[in-house]
């Protein structure tokens, strides 16, 4: 993925070809960054397992191979200046691309679910980090699963144009309730601003685990100076509350996209739902903080940093007993 990121950045600079109004190398770059971030997270996680290390290794390998092959065909289609997703042409390259998607995208999803189950079996380590993993992986799995909804809600048979201005038969789209071209896209992400876009909940779900892990690690670091955070149960509750709120945002953005509504132009129902989720999350977190402030945990004697890196106890959360 790191190599693909470099190649894609070079492609953006030296290759003037476009596809769907953006550089042919934009999609490989996005997938490279996304899979690099997620892959690093899973690699770190699997190295910290206590129970089921061998099983975790095998499912991690399935995830790595499946993700690698999926992104390779995406990059190959981009290099050829054509569509990787929704392409129904019968040329050799697209046959390879679609066959790879057919077999390895489901494997990618199932491997992630399996890793999530293995993580749920862990009972050692920092509760905050465990809570982040136990909630973040299911949210990420839902983010992967939501893309399968596309085929039931998006336009069916239509024609696109590749980088050589040749017609390409397509079926389906990431856009909902709008012209397949989608109008102007959001900067950087390219999300459709003229209607609904299923890539929004896909992105939010897939990277929820990163936000939750950062929160758990941050709370653990703050515990050295904040007595009320020294109780692992408090940190775990706060992570769980944020995870619940984040799940609410994921569901709302999915609902919004399926109604053909732009993420940049929410209606009253969407705004109200978001406010309810934010208010509920804030109220629950405030309650936990107030209770913790009333019963702070005394400081513990310092101990040697745990093996596993500069994150100390948080980074070594799973292997500790």
Image (cartoon, rainbow, N blue to C red):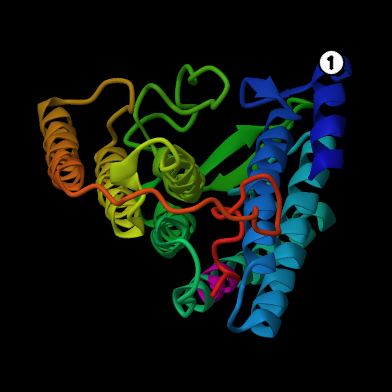
* Image point (36%, 57%), residue name: 232
Residue 29 is left or right of residue 312, and the answer is: right
Q: Is residue 174 above or below residue 21?
A: below
Coordinates of residue 21 in the picture (x, y in percent)? 62, 20
Residue 34 is left or right of residue 100, and the answer is: left
- Label 1: few (<14), some (14–19) or many (≥20) C-alpha neighbours in 10 Å: few
Residue 94 location, quadrant: bottom right
* Image point (66%, 21%), residue name: 22
Q: Quadrant of the N terminus?
A: top right
Front residue of 3/301: it is 301
* Image point (54%, 25%), residue name: 190
- Residue 254 on the magenta span: no
Coordinates of residue 295 in the picture (x, y in percent)? 18, 49
Note whether residue 27 is visible: yes
- Range of the magenta residues? 110-115
Q: Is residue 185 above or below residue 213?
A: above
Q: How many marks?
A: 1
Residue 143 is left or right of residue 171, and the answer is: left
Q: Is residue 216 above or below residue 266?
A: below
Q: Say what secondary structure mark 1 lies in.
A: helix
Residue 257 is left or right of residue 267, and the answer is: right
Coordinates of residue 57 in the picture (x, y in percent)? 71, 76
User: Residue at label 1?
Assistant: 13
Note whether residue 173 is visible: no
Which secondary structure is most common in the magenta stretch? helix
Q: Is residue 236 above or below residue 157?
A: below
Q: Residue furthest front?
A: 301
Q: Quadrant of the C terminus?
A: bottom right
- Residue 112 on the magenta span: yes
Coordinates of residue 308 in the picture (x, y in percent)? 70, 57
* Image point (69%, 29%), residue name: 26
Front residue of 256/129: it is 129
């Amino acid at each position: 993925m790191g190599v693909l990121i470099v190649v894609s950045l070079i492609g953006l600079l030296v290759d003037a070809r476009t596809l769907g109004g953006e550089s042919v190398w934009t999609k490989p770059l996005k997938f490279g960054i996304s899979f690099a971030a997620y892959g690093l997270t899973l690699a770190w996680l699997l190295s910290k397992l206590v129970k089921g290390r061998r099983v975790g290794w095998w499912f991690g390998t399935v995830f790595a191979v499946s993700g690698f092959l999926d992104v390779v065909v995406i990059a190959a289609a981009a290099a050829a200046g054509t569509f990787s997703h929704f392409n129904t042409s019968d040329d050799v390259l697209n046959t390879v691309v679609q066959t790879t998607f057919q077999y390895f995208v489901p494997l990618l999803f199932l491997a992630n679910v399996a890793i999530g189950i293995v993580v749920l079996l862990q009972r050692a380590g920092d509760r905050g980090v465990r809570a982040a993993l136990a909630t973040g992986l299911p949210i990420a799995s839902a983010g992967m699963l939501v893309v399968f909804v596309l085929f039931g809600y998006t336009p069916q048979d239509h024609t696109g144009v590749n980088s050589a201005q040749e017609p390409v038969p397509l079926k389906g789209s990431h856009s909902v309730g709008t012209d397949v071209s989608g109008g102007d896209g959001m900067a950087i992400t390219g999300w459709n601003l003229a209607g609904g876009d299923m890539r929004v909940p896909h992105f939010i779900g897939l990277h929820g685990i990163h936000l939750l892990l950062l929160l758990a690690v941050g709370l653990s670091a703050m515990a050295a100076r904040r007595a009320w955070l020294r109780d692992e149960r408090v940190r775990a509750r706060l992570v769980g509350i944020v995870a619940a709120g984040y799940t609410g945002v994921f569901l709302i953005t999915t609902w919004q996209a399926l109604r053909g509504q732009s993420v940049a132009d929410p209606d009253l129902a969407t705004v109200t739902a978001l406010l309810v989720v934010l208010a509920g999350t804030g109220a629950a977190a405030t309650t936990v903080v107030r209770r913790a402030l009333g019963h702070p945990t005394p400081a513990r004697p310092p101990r040697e940093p745990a093996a596993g890196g500069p994150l100390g106890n948080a980074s070594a959360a799973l292997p500790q007993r």
